[in-house]
Each structure stands twice: as C-alpha cells, then as structure tokens.
Image (cartoon, rainbow, N blue to C red):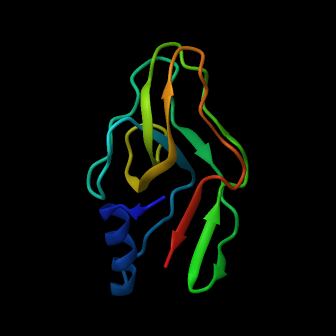
Amino acid sequence: MAAISNYLEEKWLNTMRGSSYTAPANVYVALFTTQPTDAVAGTEPAGSSYNRQPVTFTTPVQDNDKCTIKNSTEIVFAAATESWGTISWVGLFDAAAGGNMLWQGAVNTAKTVDIDDQVRFQINELVITLE
C-alpha cells in the first residue's frame, strides 16, 4: 500500500502536541474501482454482495529503516453477485461502512471482478510499510 490518509496523518501528528488518538477497534479493507487520494476515497463496488472485510495485522517489524505490518489472516470477500468492475486500488478504514480512510494504495495486479468472482488476499499479501 502506498499512502497514509490526510485524516490519519493529522491524528498521528497531533499526538506530538499532546492530543490523544484512539486507534480503531477494527480495521477494514475496501476495494476501489477508481483511484483514491490521501484526502478522498476511491469508488467502492456497488452491489448487495460487496462489503468491506476486517483485517488483522502482524506485529510491526523493523528492517533497514522501514517498519512493516502484514495481514495475519486471509482476507476473503464474498462472491460477486454482479460485476464489481476492475479493482485496482485498496483502502483501509476504521469502520465497516462510512468511517475514515486510514491508508490507500494500488494493488499489484488489477482484477476485473465479474459474477461469481471472489477477491482474496492471502496471508502476508497486504503489506503496509512506513519509512
């Protein structure tokens, strides 16, 4: 994943000013058919079978001045009951619907999701790195 959202940047930096930030109890993966920015989420698939999926991350690991976390369990979206379009980006949110975008970035390989297709992220496939 590529970029921290403006929302989370402000929350983290405000901790340096003594403002507390309560981490979300759960983090959810969203799929996007349009490119997000740090300020605005991309377009999520429309349809009754699409829902953001919860994600659990590994403990952060430091390596060569980079800190990385990865998904510790497989992330599986429901089978599409209609076309979701081409998924080229993902985002992390603090809510299953609505909420605040925390992170966003491009997927390694875009996937066109048609009826009965499923999107999956294998363990350690969703990688978040801070430098």
Residue 10, located in which quarter of the rendered image? bottom left
x, y percentage for residue 13?
Answer: 35, 79
Does 22 appear above or below 26? Answer: below
Does 47 appear above or below 105? Answer: above
x, y percentage for residue 55?
Answer: 62, 48
Say if residue 91 shows up in the picture: yes
In this picture, residue 31 sits left or right of residue 75: left
Most foreground residue, 112 or 36:
112
Say if residue 94 shows up in the picture: no
x, y percentage for residue 119?
Answer: 59, 32
In this picture, residue 71 sits left or right of residue 50: right
Residue 78, located in which quarter of the rendered image? top right
Please tell me which residue is depicted at 43% across the width and 54% down the height of the picture: 105
Most foreground residue, 83 or 95:
83
Please tell me which residue is depicted at 51% across the width and 30% down the height of the picture: 51
Does 13 appear above or below 88? Answer: below
Please tell me which residue is depicted at 33% across the width and 36% down the height of the picture: 43
Most foreground residue, 105 or 47:
105
x, y percentage for residue 41?
Answer: 32, 46
Please tell me which residue is depicted at 40% across the width and 64% down the height of the picture: 4
